[in-house]
Image (tube, rainbow, N blue to C red):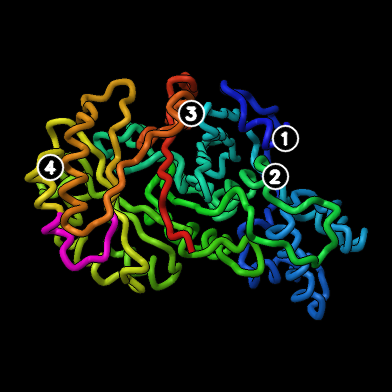
Amino acid sequence: MAATEALNLDRPVKAPVRPAIAAEKPTLIGLSREDMGKALADIGVPLKQVKMRASQLWNWLYVRGVSDFDHMSNVSKDMRELLKRHFTIARPEIVEEQISTDGTRKWLLRFPPRGAGRPVEIETVYIPEEGRGTLCVSSQVGCTLTCSFCHTGTQKLVRNLTAEEILSQLLLARDRLGDFPDRDTPAGAVVPNEGRKVTNMVMMGMGEPLYNFENVKTALLIATDGDGLSLSKRRVTLSTSGIVPEIFRTGEEIGVMLAISLHAVKDDLRDMLVPINKKYPLKELLDACRKYPGLSNARRITFEYVMLEGVNDTLEDAKELVRLLKGIPAKINLIPFNPWPGTNYQCSKWEEIEKFADFINAAGYASPIRTPRGRDILAACGQLKSDSERMRKVDRMALEALMIANHGEDD
């Protein structure tokens, strides 16, 4: 199905199930150039060829998006056979693909167990907007943070995703959207970045990215490598609930945009909404934000604030929010709460959200109100959850997905 045709569908569709990644073979996806070179040397590639071969493979994997060694036309047949015997570059299995009436897409992906007992599943969501396309990527299967308003928090952590599994979500999305060059494009040809369907990437799917720091770091450095997938670091946003010790490292070692799931302006309420606040309270969190490397008016921190009726949506809350963020170059994204089965919260009334936004704007902070997207396929903010809960199947149609768009700069 062509991407342009699929985006016009007005109902969810299922994608054909494809074979899962062969678990017995290591993958080349998600390896740094140095580690890829070591892997090639380990299977007998002559040392004098290692750097050249690694560069060659990097181009095929991340510029051209190849997922089959046989499609690497400028690699000798003997070398392709050697690579096939030892490695895989296959995509994850698509269990289900749904396409919303507004063009939002949600993929349910399956990965090998890798210590979890059974294969695991995660969700990835794509939201097209005018002038950009944002991909929401998961970093863990489940979550440990148990935020009371978030459906993902009701799913216990199964395991961390590997760098390959994080990166594969981006590769697969670009496959499905026709976002890689045609296979017959000459090797080494200059491929323009303009016109891409995936322009922005947000680490806001399942899990807390900073509890899987090393794998997230590796994946994002590959995603932003200028000789490969080439996403701008200003168009990649990592969202955290407030793992203070890793916030500085994120700016220093990865250099992407930062988003904070704030949701409350007082510690007692945030302790309930975002329990990690008991370990890293607001003062520590905001001090870490002020020290974020590269912070400026051109590289603002985004603060996520879900609007909960009668909980955090008063004018007094808005005033305290402005006071707390004083001196931090920031944007405040107001997120209308998306209900999910079993929740005790309700979305704030629209007029209350607008009053809140007007006060924030008048104080000098951009405060866009998030337009819910993908509700007809259960793909709205704060609702992502997969079937991999305690390694048992649950009713997939009762599950929902998270997507937060409008992050990163339009550089």
The mark closer to the camera, 4 or 1, is 1
Other-residue count near label 1 (Cα within 10 Å), few / some / many at <14 / 14–19 / ≥20: few
> Residue 58, relative to residue 333: is it above or below?
below
Q: Which residue is mark 3?
A: 387
Q: Which residue is mark 2?
A: 178
First in sequence: mark 4 vs mark 1 = 1
- For the residues marked 2 and 3, what is the alpha-carbon distance in whole angstroms? 28 Å
Choose between 132 and 243: the one closer to the eye. Answer: 132
Counting from the top left corner in percent of width and height, residue 383 is at: 38, 32
| Residue 178 among magenta residues | no
Q: Nearer the N terminus, badge 2 or badge 3?
A: 2
Q: Amino acid at mark 4?
A: Leu
Q: Amino acid at mark 3?
A: Asp
The answer to whether 260 appears left or right of 380 in the picture is left
Magenta range is: 322-331
Residue at (56% x, 44% y) in the render: 114
CB atoms of marks 1 and 2 within 8 Å: yes
Q: Earlier in the sequence, mark 1 or mark 3?
A: 1
Vertical arrangement, residue 202 with respect to residue 217, above or below: above
Q: Nearer the viewer, mark 3 or mark 4?
A: 4
Q: Are marks 3 and 4 in contact (CB under 8 Å)?
A: no
The image's mark for residue 2 is 1
Marks 2 and 4 sit apart, C-alpha to C-alpha, by: 45 Å
Give the Cα separation between the discs numbered 1 and 3: 28 Å
Residue hosting label 4 = 269
Mark 3 residue element: loop
